[in-house]
Image: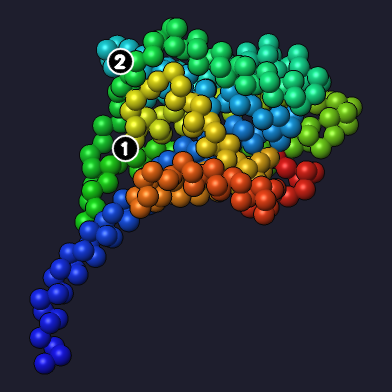
Amino acid sequence: MGETALPAITPTLKGEWSMTFSLFFQSIINGLNLGATYALIALGYTMVYGIIRMINFAHGDFIMIGAYTLFYTIPLMVNAGMPAWLAVIAAIVVCAIVGVLVEIFAYRPVRKAGPMSALITAMAMSIFLENLAMVLFGARPHNVQKIFNLPSVKVWGVTLSMNVLLTILIGVAIMAGLQIFVKKTRMGKAMRAVPQDPDASILAGINVNKVITITFAIGSGLAAIAALMYCSGYPRVTNDMGSMMGIKAFIAAVFGGIGVIPGAMLGGVLVGLIEIFVKLFAPGWYEAVTYTILIVILLVKPSGILGKNVGEKV
């Protein structure tokens, strides 16, 4: 008697399990894609903070600049018969140049004026870049053309976009390469030496201004790649798209340990996964949960998950 109910229930349970697993697996991929984007942006925050102890709140707007560059250069490359991926190089160059100009003309003059002056300058620069983009490109959203037109594949019954998978791999490779650069190269060692003792670094022959400028260029270039990753999943660009992404990437940097490169990577991935899964189960709460994470981290472990003492940062 006890066995009669099983045959009728099993197919339903199997279908529900299959659908739940598909949704879970798809959410993992989406979370990794969004998390890798946040991680690349957070790396820009953490590199600048690690060098000059400054939070560059305009950093999120470099994503917007990169996205607009992609929007205009991808059709140019395609129409000229050139590979569309060259638009990514153009975006990296444009973002790096803008980052260097912002550092030289906006941040360098107030570098020794105190943290409050630097903070106000960074916020003013963010507002300036967003309003400049609105004047130049308008407030209407623009759809960014895809660079990679790869087919979708089925993995365990789940249809996955190869474009998204490729951008995740690109993000992981860049983060790993940046870690090697900072640990193994001469410039990377200079980047680690400057925040520990700027005066001693100068006596050792390190050009501090050059190191800071290169740091801004690298961080801004990473924002262009983050724009590519973001547009692969959400192919739309607006003049204010960078502000919210910048805030979330800042939360990711604090979450993982601001000033610590592996911390920025870890924090970005975790924030991306958390946001996607909260959207799945409680769509109206994902913003609140993201900010709650920041509050809890600041209360429980202000240095972040991988945060260490100041001397070991970057």
The answer to whether residue 293 is left or right of residue 141 is: right
Residue extending furthest toward the bottom = 1
Which amino acid is tagged 1?
A: Asn
> Can residue 1 be spotted in the picture?
yes
Residue 62 to residue 155: above or below: above
SS assignment at label 2: helix
194 or 236: nearer the viewer: 236
- Which of the numbered marks, if any, corresponds to residue 75? 2
Residue 42, position in %: x, y? 57, 37
Classify residue 45 by image quadrant: top right
Q: SS class of the residue under badge 1?
A: helix
**Closer to us: 217 or 5:** 5
CA gap between label 2 and label 1 equals: 18 Å
Position of 183 relative to 74 (above/below): below
Nearer-N-terminus badge (2/1): 2
* Left or right: 187 as drawn, with respect to 270: right
Is 33 rendered above or below residue 105?
Answer: below
User: Identity of the amino acid at label 2?
Assistant: Pro
**Residue 74 picture location, percent across and down:** 34, 18
